[in-house]
Structures are given as C-alpha cells and as structure tokens.
Image (spheres, helix red, strand yellow):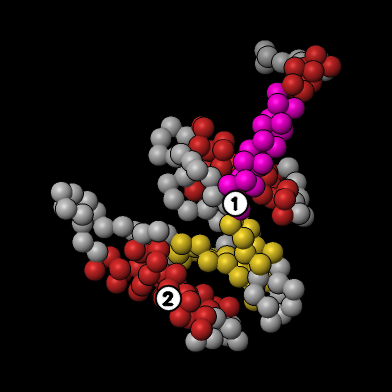
Amino acid sequence: MDCVTCAVRSRFEELAKANQLRGNSLKEIQARVAKGAHEAAKAARDLWLPPLGDEKRDPPVGEFVVCGYHAENPWVLEIHRNGTVAPREQEGFTAIGSGDTFAYFSVANWRRWGIKMDKLDHAALVAFSLLDDAIHAAPRWLRGPVQIWTMAKPVSSTAAPMIEELSKAKIDALGTAYATWRAAQIESLPGLFDAQPAPAISVPQ
C-alpha cells in the first residue's frame, strides 16, 4: 500500500474514532470526508521522497471512493486527486482511474435495457463483465488484476454497512461464470439470425 493510501485510511480511522462520521447531514459528512482525504493525501505527498536512483519519479497520487449509509440510504462519494468530489448516489456505483469512462458507458448501456440487479452476486458478475470488457477492449492503460468492493445494507440504523473486498477466489469464480455467460451469448447469436430473416432495406428512390 502506498504512502498516500495509508495516510488517507488513517485519517478516515481518526474521523470514525472521533465520531465525526455520524449524526450529521449527509452533505456535512461528505464534506468532512473529502476534506480529510485531500489534506491527508497532500501531507503524504509533501513528505514523500523519491527512491535513490529514480529521483525524477513523480510523487504518488490518489483517487478514492468512499461509501456508506445515511438515514437508511446508501451513498457513494468519488474524491479526485485535486480534491474535487462527485457524489454518485444516483448512479449507485463509481469507478476511478483512466478507464472509468468505460465503466460508466457500460452501465449506462445496461440501464438502457431496464435490467435490474437485486442481488449482490448478480451485481458483482455484471461489474466483473464490465471491467473485463474494458480491459480487453481498451487500446491502452488498462490491465488487471480486477478489484471489486461490495456494500450491503447494515442490519440496523446504528450499525456500519457491510463492506467487502472480493477475494481472489471470488474474483476467479466470477471470471469462470462470465466465461460461461459469454460462451452462451456467442453460441446463441448464429441461431438468432438463422431463425429470423434479416429485415428488408428500403432504398429511397
């Protein structure tokens, strides 16, 4: 874990111990979280020294996704490296890094078909498929390993949400499931064309 990530995680732990992440409006909580992340990341970069022999290396930067529940509703906050934020309550998910455009486009395409995902397992499989497609279709920058985090509703209003980073075994299982899914799609495609005649193309006179 790099120094910026360590510093931001420590700041979040300090805020939690000081009870600064409860009992306020969502706007106040998100502002406090964003300010803490930006200040901690900046302080870590200011103290960073390049390794010997690589003095031209740039200091590490960080973009972060913070999520939680407030008044029984989930919230997702994207914190950019320059300190600006983007709430993602409406989207219900977030993606950061050079490939985030691929994820947002793919989810928008899913929503176009009105597909609902009521189970975390289903959502995780869709998330994996979007990431895998982006990695294999993007011209550059993107590569594995895939990381996926899930957040389940807390059991009570005073409990913390159940947040889990999927293990390598679970990621591998998602990869196997997605390979089966893709194979079914590929196998069914020729049959769709064979069963239905192609629509006639009218050429304006």
Task: Name the amino acid type tagged 2.
Answer: Arg
Residue 188 occupies quadrant: top right
User: Which label sits in the foreground, 2 or 1?
Assistant: 1
Read off the residue under disc 1.
167
Q: Residue at x 71, y 75 (%)?
A: 72
Q: Is residue 154 above or below residue 57?
A: below
Q: Is residue 173 magenta?
A: yes
Q: Is residue 105 in view from this perspective?
A: no
Q: Is residue 135 above or below residue 88?
A: above
Read off the residue under disc 2.
11
Image position of 114 (left or right of 22): right
Residue sticking out furthest to the right: 195
Task: Name the amino acid type tagged 1.
Answer: Ser
- The mark that comes first in sequence, 2 or 1, is 2
Q: Position of residue 187 (x, y in %)?
A: 74, 21
What number is the disc on residue 146?
none
Residue bounds of the magenta highlight = 166-186
Image position of 200 (left or right of 128): right
Q: Main secondary structure of the magenta part?
A: helix
Q: Residue at x 38, y 70 (%)?
A: 7
Label 2: how many Cα within 10 Å (few below 14, some 14–19, many 20+):
some
Image position of 169 (left or right of 145): right
Q: Position of residue 160 (x, y in %)?
A: 64, 75
Image position of 139 (left or right of 148): left
Q: Look at the numbered discs 2 and 1 and tell me whether their residues touch, using CB distance below 8 Å.
A: no
Mark 2: secondary structure: helix
